[in-house]
Image (cartoon, rainbow, N blue to C red):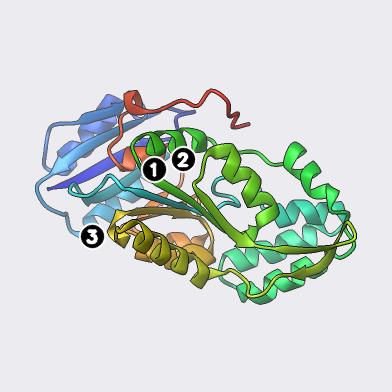
Amino acid sequence: MYVVTLIANPERANLTPVLAAQTATKLGVQDVSWLCESTACDIFIPSARHPVEIELLWEDLQKQEIDLVVQPVNGRRKKILLADMDSTMIQQECIDELAIEVGVGAHVAGITARAMNGELDFDEALIERVGLMKGLDSAVIQTVLDTRIDLMPGGAKLLATMKANGAYAALVSGGFTDFTQAIAVKLGFDENRANTLLHKDGSLTGKVKMPILGREAKVDALNQITTKLGLSADDVIAVGDGANDLGMLALAGCGVALHAKPVVAAQCDVRLNFADLTGLLYVQGYKQSDFVFPKTVSES
């Protein structure tokens, strides 16, 4: 048995009963199971459809800003969340925000975009960008955290709901521990892994601690965490947007490309281009009535 999940951005909530019923008919069935009115539903089908047929259906729904995910019913609810941070759990790229403080924001943002789309070597691009931060007052990091970092919509509900259901959550970033530690505490991650910016006498040295945590480090994190918990990669739902996330997305039982760069979306079966992070809950079969709403976290 397979399940086809349709998910809209909850801000638009434009998934109508008519559209859901039409999609079910195209899939050769009639029943629609609603996860959230106007936002998400499941359509159960007896077998996987032809990939070309599914892709055409996906393309048609994308025109209406609706995401579509197809997966086996068995094992859809996961026991581990492995999440990227920049442009995934938060709306910004932290190094770009730091670069603004030293007057090279546009230049660094361009390098970041190319690195995340797989056009540049990740390690080399990181070393180059960090080098431009040399001399920046370390206190600026907290200022950026306080004033310019916004949580991605739905992230707090995603963490609270999965944690309430016994899942383990790890934040694994090619960014920096100065930021991941704060975001991990704020959202309730069990652990965080990232690169370490080197500081001296209250300023950034322009260097990062070696070795750099890139694509392989995220794969290593998945393998180490599953081994520690006595679970397997099939028990993991991973989410990211950049080329350095591709390894963990491919290995996870469910790898979600969230508002991802083109090179990433092209290589992932689960693509959420319009849903927010609560889409990961709908993908796992959670209903809105199952959501846990944290009272202490603002996502704006």
- Give the SS element for disc 2: loop
The residue sitting at 72% across, 57% down in the picture is 95
**Residue located beneath label 1 in the image:** 280
Which class describes the residues within 10 Å of circle 2: few (<14), some (14-19), or many (20+)?
many
Residue toward you, 251 or 26 = 251
* Relative horizontal placement of residue 85, taking residue 258 as reference (left or right): right
Check if mark 2's residue and mark 1's residue have beta carbons within 8 Å.
yes
Residue 250: image quadrant is: bottom left
* Gap in angstroms between the C-alphas marked 3 and 2: 25 Å
Q: Amino acid at mark 2?
A: Leu
- Give the SS element for disc 3: helix
Q: Is residue 62 above or below residue 286?
A: below
**Residue located beneath label 2 in the image:** 277
The residue sitting at 55% across, 38% down in the picture is 187
Q: Is residue 164 above or below residue 206?
A: above
The label on residue 51 is 3
Q: Amino acid at mark 1?
A: Leu
* Relative horizontal placement of residue 145, taking residue 19 as reference (left or right): right
The residue sitting at 59% across, 50% down in the picture is 87
Check if mark 3's residue and mark 1's residue have beta carbons within 8 Å.
no
